[in-house]
Amino acid sequence: MNKNSSVFKKYLPLALGGMLLTASVGLMSYNNGPGKSLLAESDLKVDTVATGLTMPWASALLPNGDILVTERGGKLRLVSKGKLDATPVAGIPEVWYKGQGGLLDIALHPDYKTNGWIYISYSSPKKDGEEGDDGGANTALMRAKLKGKELTDIQHLFKALPNVKGNVHFGGRIVFDKKGYVFLSLGERGQKENSQNLSKDQGKVVRLFEDGKIPTDNPFVKTAGAKPEIWTYGHRNPQGMVIHPTTGVIWEHEHGPQGGDELNIVEKGKNYGWPLITYGIDYDNSIISKDTAKAGLEQPVIFWRPSIAPCGMTFVTSDKFKDWKGDLIVGSLKFMQLQHLTVKGNKVTKREVIFDKIGRVRDVRQGWDGNIYVVLENSGKVVRISPKS
Amino acid sequence: MKLILVLLSGIVFCSAVFPTQDDELAKSIERGKMVYSENCISCHMGTGEGVTATFPPLAKSDYFMENPENGIKAVKFGLMGKIKVNGVEYDNMMPSPGLGNDEIADVMNYIMNSWGNSSEKKMITEKMVEAVEEKK
């Protein structure tokens, strides 16, 4: 046994190096995968379904065709029968609108048609007695119901702590796994070392019951000093999060440092490595870590170099996009485009840019009608992508 | 030797107690660096070079240096639509980072005195930022 382990130790660096090399080649393969998909951008059309929004962040596509849109400045807007209602929906709490903060994501409960619950995330200013910097903020989750033009039955479910004064990295995506849990992604608020600190909510994905209670089978419930809501850690600023339509596992993307944006498969208790490992370097060109891989730290499915500033993402499940079924559509703030990622199992085999220069993409969703809806921050629009014929 | 020390500490004392505008500018630049690294760096990059045709440069930028008010406006109110910088067209959007007028002055002073830029000792003050209004 001893002998075996020493042999193992001897060859471990070699084996790891080899694995790294293979992984890097795989991760960097770009736009050259086999099997060109049949459906192309030229088969699709883009129609504007809402306009006149100010810095929209996310959308909830209601079953009756109406759309709720969050504006980062702190307003929730209703698009009814194709027209933006001039009066914002009442009931949004005080929002910390500064830097990257503000009113963020919105998501309908999977049983929205029967229970009416709407979940909303936002940057919440520090309240008296809360942990953290005075004048600071962190991401919070609430739920409410829509009655006419008002939110009712408002319940505050969760607030990430501590409050931090910095302007960046709020995360904020909400997803449901259809097993009774809701997940919220949290940015590290510009304090990268805290992504690895289980006593803080920064740089985590948290898992809650749909009423905000903390499940007792969360991975760190029994870890001394750890926050029991934590599901995964070592994230930087995750702003895309979806459930895989067949495996039910979370796929997440996050803004990395320069050249290090990542797509990850997020699984219970795992550490995604920020800032211990990264494919990127800091924006002042300094090295954050010399390592891109380490034992015990998860590797991304892919990373983007150069960074695309990914925001919003959906799996395609609709028959309207047959050849793309099971694939991902990811938004890019930086290059103002969408990327179609061909997904095979747990791998991305091809990336293609679609609708280049469409706008600063904040949100990408598949609607009840099977079409894809995209929120554009710069033009203040929601657009629908659907097949031409 | 003692005399030199006394003189030196005298100078340090005076410069701390009676700051000249140069010191004010230096301090503002120092604070501005922090503001920049938190709010601007991920698009405009560590040395202000931006990303050609995506995010405009701030280093030796004609748009910025020839009319600093352009810069103040962009930071104060955000910027949307087409602009031309050093002959290249940009059609992206910069959300307003929501900074205070003092922070805007600091980050302006930092940008205007970094990466080959020089404000020639001229300083942007909080008051100047306050006076800039959004034109629709």
Image (tube, grey):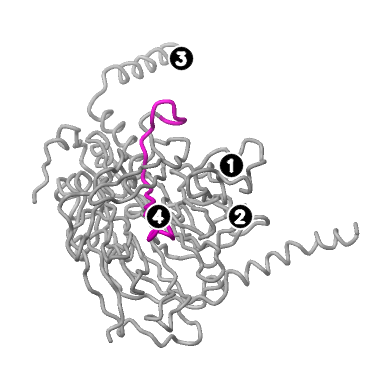
Q: Is residue A389 left or right of residue A190?
A: left
Q: Which amino acid is tagged 3?
A: Met
Q: Nearer the viewer, mark 4 or mark 2?
A: 4
In the picture, the disc for residue A268 is 2
Q: Nearer the viewer, mark 4 or mark 3?
A: 4
Vertical placement of residue A149 versus A311, above or below: above
Q: Is residue B10 left or right of residue A248?
A: left
Element type where label 2 sits in the image: loop
Q: Which amino acid is tagged 4?
A: Asn
What is the spatial separation of the Cα atoms under label 1 and label 4, in whole angstroms? Answer: 27 Å
The chain under label 1 reads A
In the picture, the disc for residue B1 is 3
Q: Which amino acid is tagged 2?
A: Lys
Q: Could you classify mark 4 by the number of other residues whose Cα lies within 10 Å: few (under 14), some (14-19), or many (20 or more)? A: few
Q: Nearer the viewer, mark 3 or mark 2?
A: 2
Residue drawn where x is 27% and y is 39% of the image: B99
Q: Residue B44: percent from the left, percent from the top? A: 32, 54
Q: Residue A37: percent from the left, percent from the top? A: 43, 85
User: Quick one: A375 or A60, which is closer to the camera?
Assistant: A60
Q: Which amino acid is tagged 1?
A: Pro
Element type where label 4 sits in the image: helix
Image quarter of the C terminus of chain A: bottom left
What is the spatial separation of the Cα atoms under label 3 and label 1, in whole angstroms? Answer: 63 Å
User: In which quarter of the view is residue B132 placed?
Assistant: top left
Element type where label 3 sits in the image: loop
Query: What segment is highlighted magenta in the picture?
Result: A109-133
Residue under circle 1? A228
